[in-house]
């Protein structure tokens, strides 16, 4: 066997929970370690260790990501009341992804992994549609009140050394409701930069939409910020990469997306992204074939699978039953991180390995060997159901061969 690929700088490795933790170690053992001398800064974000460290490990992993620039994360349990009991937690620790996102201040990009034999519900979608969701503000940071009959609602701005401004919202004859939302220029600018950078990085057009014909100040602000960031910082690079920035109204956008072939990044305001990412994921067929990348304006990248810890399969696994859990999104989280590490370090070898790993994974499925979730969807005539480890070994053979 030829020599293993060496890494110049580490990847921050965040281990996780349940079935994905099992997959994590199998992927490393069977697919990565035989070919790469793995160099990682390891953080155990498994729930027991979060409890043991009073969740400091999560913040430390995020800080390390800012230092090293590239991270790969396993799915983790976000505790609820049941988990507090199951793991004997001293408190209901916050969502690790929320903690990491608030430290990296990032935008999340979700992209489907397409494979022959699994047709999307929209047959023209032959290339992936990547959704970039703005993760701050709007209705997710709202304040709202029920308004009784006879109440008057106003929008009031004070402070900042400026005269007070008051705008009437509505005089309630009968009862009703009222809501206040906000966003900040800083957050919109960093969202815009993350979107333009990711589009450049992946050489895809960037599409963005809002409702600026109706929301002439609020949504208009998003449109204007995107345009000025593009003109000032990205226009030339986009022209050089032969990609485009395209803005339209959100209703027109939805119609265009449905008729499109895919192959672009769709930047969405917070609510649009919440709704549309589930629509897009469902239309491509399987949550187990969705990757997720967090891009920080501070220059750091974190890769993970879009699905959770696959709890139901884990309980079967613990009972000694065979499972057929799909490791593809976990493999692609690793390949994404290795490729980015290779690019940042000028290591062609490492980036090429990432490409070969992804190709071997897809070729395995296209040859007919697949886990249960895909077996149920695939139209391949020679398809064969593999358990978790059989599938990984088939990928390993192909990768070595
Ligand atoms: P989940 O782990 O995504 O699983 C939901 C269902 O989707 C599974 O029961 C399974 O369906 C199917 N599925 C998901 N991934 C699969 C895979 N790789 N292979 C085959 N089937 C797959 O969501 P959940 O059960 O709602 O959440 C479990 C835990 O994950 C929770 O504690 C939650 O906090 C955590 N979570 C973490 C993240 C993250 O870290 N990013 C994200 C979401 C949820 P069948 O059972 O029908 O086979
Ligand atoms: Mg949602």
Image (tube, rainbow, N blue to C red):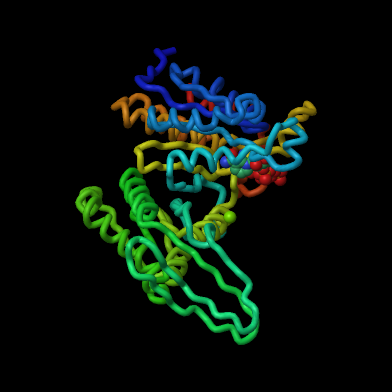
| Residue 191, placed above or below residue 220 | above
Where does the image place residue 23, in percent across and percent down from the top left? Answer: 61, 29
Q: State ligand 2's quadrant.
A: bottom right
| Residue 111, placed above or below residue 24 | below
Direction from residue 116 to residue 201 in the image, left or right = left
* Residue at x-position 44% and y-position 31%: 63
Q: Quadrant of the N terminus?
A: top left
Where does the image place residue 182, in percent across and percent down from the top left? Answer: 45, 62
* Residue at x-position 46% and y-position 67%: 254
Q: Tell me where residue 388 sits by quadrant.
A: top right
User: Foreground: 133 or 341?
Assistant: 133
* Residue at x-position 32% and y-position 46%: 197
Q: Tell me where residue 370 sits by quadrant.
A: top right
* Residue at x-position 34% and y-position 64%: 223
Single out the residue that lies furthest toward the right.
319
Where does the image place residue 399, in percent across and percent down from the top left? Answer: 48, 26
Q: Tell me where residue 11 sits by quadrant.
A: top left
Task: Give the mark count.
Answer: 0
Direction from residue 397 to residue 3 in the image, left or right = left
User: Foreground: 172 or 380?
Assistant: 172
Where does the image place residue 251, in percent across and percent down from the top left? Answer: 45, 71
């Amino acid at each position: 066997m030829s020599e293993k690929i060496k890494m110049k700088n580490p990847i921050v490795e965040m281990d996780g929970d349940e079935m994905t933790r099992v997959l994590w170690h199998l992927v490393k053992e069977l697919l990565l370690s035989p070919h790469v001398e793995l160099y990682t800064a390891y953080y155990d974000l498994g729930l027991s260790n979060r409890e043991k460290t009073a969740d400091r490990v999560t913040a430390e992993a995020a800080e390390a990501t800012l230092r090293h620039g590239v991270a790969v994360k396993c799915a983790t349990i976000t505790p609820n009341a049941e988990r507090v009991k199951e793991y004997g937690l001293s408190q209901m620790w916050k969502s690790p992804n929320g903690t990491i996102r608030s430290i990296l201040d990032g935008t999340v990009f979700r992209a489907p992994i397409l494979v022959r034999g699994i047709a999307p519900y929209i047959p023209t979608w032959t290339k992936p549609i990547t959704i970039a969701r703005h993760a701050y503000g709007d209705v997710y940071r709202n304040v709202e009140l029920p308004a009784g009959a006879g109440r008057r609602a106003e929008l009031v701005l004070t402070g900042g050394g400026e005269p007070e401004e008051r705008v009437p919202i509505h005089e309630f004859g009968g009862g009703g409701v009222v809501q206040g939302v906000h966003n900040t220029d800083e957050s919109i600018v960093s969202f815009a930069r993350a979107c333009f950078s990711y589009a450049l990085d992946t050489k895809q057009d960037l599409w963005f939409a809002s409702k600026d014909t109706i929301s002439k100040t609020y949504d208009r602000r998003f449109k204007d910020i995107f345009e000025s960031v593009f003109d000032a910082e990205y226009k030339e690079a986009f022209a050089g990469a032969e990609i485009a920035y395209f803005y339209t109204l959100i209703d027109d956008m939805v119609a265009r997306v449905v008729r499109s072939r895919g192959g672009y990044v769709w930047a969405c305001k917070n609510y649009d992204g919440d709704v549309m990412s589930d629509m897009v994921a469902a239309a491509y067929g399987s949550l187990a074939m969705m990757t997720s990348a967090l891009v920080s304006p501070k220059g750091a990248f974190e890769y993970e699978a879009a699905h959770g810890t696959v709890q139901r399969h884990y309980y079967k696994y613990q009972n000694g039953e065979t499972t057929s859990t799909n490791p593809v999104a976990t493999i692609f989280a690793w390949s994404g991180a290795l490729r980015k590490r290779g690019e940042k370090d000028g290591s062609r070898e490492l980036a090429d390995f990432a490409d070969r790993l992804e190709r071997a994974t897809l070729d395995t499925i296209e040859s007919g060997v697949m886990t249960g979730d895909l077996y149920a969807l695939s139209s391949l005539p020679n398809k064969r159901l593999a358990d978790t480890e059989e599938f990984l070994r088939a990928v390993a053979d192909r990768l070595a061969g």
